[in-house]
Every structure is written in structure tokens, then in C-alpha cells.
Amino acid sequence: MSQTAIDITILVIGPAGLAALMVWLVLKRRATPEKRERRRRLLLHQQGRLGEALITEIGDDHLYYSYSIRGVQYTASQDVGALRGRLPQDLSRVIGTAGMKYATNNPGNSILICEEWSGLRQPAGAASDPAA
């Protein structure tokens, strides 16, 4: 093989190989939906603004709530399946007012609870009474 043929081969295979490597790296680093949701919750916890919400309903691993920001009423839900260990055994105890955090640039993006914070109110006597 001549030097010119080798140079042409490197010019053709080099960028293609580099592109394949880049695609592989991007696909390898792609986050699962669970990781993206965890990242969203933690970002809202760190950068979100506090507000007050009303938890209206509880479904399978979901808390449904509503809140008002600057006169606009929002209705939302949060999947809390990954956070079951941070929730009370009797989920009906969380119905009512709660703290929440929301993104100031997108008030519809909100959370009630994450790995490092909870806006859920403790029922009276829950912390001191283990039977409660």
C-alpha cells in the first residue's frame, strides 16, 4: 500500500472512528429516566423557591397537589415511588397543606419531597409518639 493510500485511509477512517467514539460515549452516559428525575428533584431542592401546596389526593405512588404562584393556579402530581422510605406508612396522613419547591423560571415544575428535603407536614405528635 502506498503512502498516499494510507493517508487517504486515515483521513476517511479517522473522522468516522472519532464520530463512532463520540456516539458511543453519548449513549453510554445517557441517563435513565429515574436518574433524570432524581437530578430534577435535587436541582429543584437546591435552586427552587419555597411555596405552599395543598395535597388533595393520593394514588399508587403519586401525590396530587395544587398551588398558586403569582395568581396562577397549578395542579401537579409527583411520583414518590422511589422515595417510599421517606414517607409515613399511612399516606392519608399527608393530605392537607405542605411545603413545596418550584422552579422560578417554570413554576409548573415543582416537588413536595426529594432525597434531601421534605415539605410534607408531620402530624401533631408523630415525632414524639412512635405509635402514631
Image: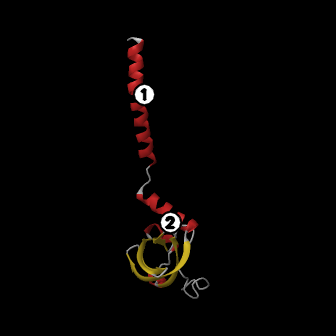
27 or 109, nearer to the observer: 109
Residue drawn at x 40%, y 14% as measured from the top left: 4
Residue 50 on image: x %, y %: 56, 75
As drawn, the label of residue 75 is none
Describe residue 64's horizontal placement relative to residue 117 as left or right.
Answer: left
* The image quarter in which residue 66 lies: bottom left
Residue 118 can be seen in this image = no
Residue nearest the observer in this picture, 38 or 82: 38
Q: Position of residue 97 (x, y in %)?
A: 50, 85
- Which sits earlier in the primary sequence, circle 2 or circle 1? 1
Task: Please name the residue that numbered disc 1 is placed on.
Answer: 14
Q: Secondary structure at mark 2?
A: helix
Residue at the image point whose x is 57% and y is 71% from the top: 117
Q: Secondary structure at mark 1?
A: helix
Q: Does 98 sit above or below residue 45? A: below
The amino acid type found where label 1 is placed reads Gly
Q: Residues within 10 Å of mark 1 (few under 14, many from 20)?
A: few
Residue 73 lies in what quarter of the image? bottom left
User: CB of mark 2 within 8 Å of CB of mark 1?
Assistant: no
Residue 71, x across and y down, in percent: 47, 82
* Quadrant in which the C terminus appears: bottom right
Q: Amino acid at mark 2?
A: Arg
Residue beneath label 2, please? Answer: 41
Residue 26: percent from left, percent from top: 43, 45
Work out which residue is located at the far front of the displayed protein and give it.
70
Q: Residue furthest right?
A: 128
Q: Residue furthest bottom?
A: 124
Give the CA distance from mark 2 to mark 1. 41 Å
Residue closest to the eye, 65 or 69: 69
